[in-house]
Every structure is written in C-alpha cells, then in structure tokens.
Image (spheres, rainbow, N blue to C red):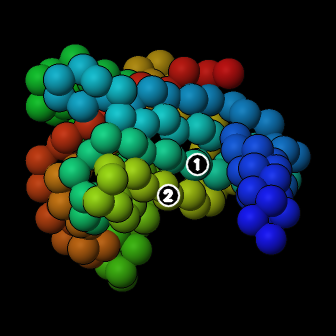
Amino acid sequence: MHRKLIPFAAIATIATAGCATVYEDNADVIGTATIVDRAGSDVGTATLYSLAGEVTISVALDGLSSGTHAVHLHMTGDCSASDFTSAGGHLNPMGNQHGRLNPQGAHLGDLPNAEVSSDGVGTVSTILRGTSATVIPQIFDADGTAIVVHEGADDYRSDPAGAAGSRVACGVFSRS
C-alpha cells in the first residue's frame, strides 16, 4: 500500500509545483514587482495580468510575520525611504476615499488583506477596479507604482489608509 502512495504523492507534488492558474495561463503578464522588507530581503512578488479587458494582481508573500497584512498599490514607484514613505499615498486617480466598505471609496490601490501563516507565507489575488485601458496607464505612468505591505490589517473603511499601520515591505512595478 505504501509503495503505491509514495509514487502517487511524488507525482502529485511534481504536477502541482510551480503551477499557474488557468487564468494566469491565458492572461498576458504586464508587470511584476519584487517585494522587499526594511532590511532589503526579498519577501514576495507581485504580478499584474491582463485578460479580457481586466487587470488582475497576484501577490505571493514569504518571510513576513504571521497575521493579517494590508496590501496596497501606492502612487509612486519609489521604495527608497527606509520606512517606504517615498511610495506616497494610495494609487487613487479618481479621488475616492479609502476602502471597499466606505460608501465614498475605494481607491484603485485598495486591495484585499493578505493572511500570512505561521511559516510566513501568504497570497492575495484580485481584479483591479476599472478596465485595462484605464488601469494600465495609471500603474505605468511617469513616476510608476509601488506595492506596499503594511504591518496590520486594513479595516476597509478608514480614510486614507485603512488604519493598517506602518509599511513593512515595498516593491516597484516594472512593465513586462
């Protein structure tokens, strides 16, 4: 019995390692960002996909503290400040208030929280608000766009940043 399970488990592990979703297989990669923490260590990646007039972001984190972390797109592609404030505020071309639960929200940069497990791993994926024709030029404008991970959860309503705490990781998108 064990001999049958071991090969099957090995095949299943190999088959699923590095798998992309059906969406990712069919979508065009339009941008990527390597996310680093304050010490400069890589703690994740973010990938922007375009398919059927939509833009989806997929974020994979590895090496952050466990718990719920806010993830936002910020208006300037600059992570040079030690506290990542150089990334500016949230990407908000329409001038909305913050949060999907705010009746006057949300920013283009408002993303779902990431749940990071005890081993430091977490993911988040969502469709960005707007069409690819409107979203892509906002992300790849003259000063670029950063993705920022915060120390705490986004409450999805407090303006301007969801009471998410300090910025603990940051990455700058480059066009693919």
Name the residue at 45% across, 27% down. 34
| 50 lies above or below 29 | below
- In front here: 93 or 30? 30
Q: CA distance from mark 2 to mark 1?
A: 8 Å
Q: Earlier in the sequence, mark 2 or mark 1?
A: 1
Residue type, label 1: Ile
Q: In this figure, which residue is indicated by the disc labeled 1? A: 57
Q: Position of residue 72 (x, y in %)?
A: 36, 50
- In front here: 37 or 87? 37
Whether residue 176 is visible, yes or no, is: yes
> Helix or strand or loop: what does disc 2 sit on?
strand
| 131 lies above or below 14 | below
Give the mark toward the camera: 2 or 1.
2
Q: Position of residue 102 (x, y in %)?
A: 32, 78
Position of 102 with respect to 26 (left or right) is left
Dot 2, crowdedness within 10 Å: few (<14), some or many (≥20)? some
| Tag 2 near tag 1, CB within 8 Å | yes
Q: Position of residue 46 (x, y in %)?
A: 51, 38
Name the residue at 24% across, 73% down. 155
> Helix or strand or loop: what does disc 1 sit on?
strand
Whether residue 53 is visible, yes or no, is: no
Dot 1, crowdedness within 10 Å: few (<14), some or many (≥20)? some
Q: In this figure, which residue is indicated by the disc labeled 2? A: 124
Q: Quadrant of the N terminus?
A: bottom right
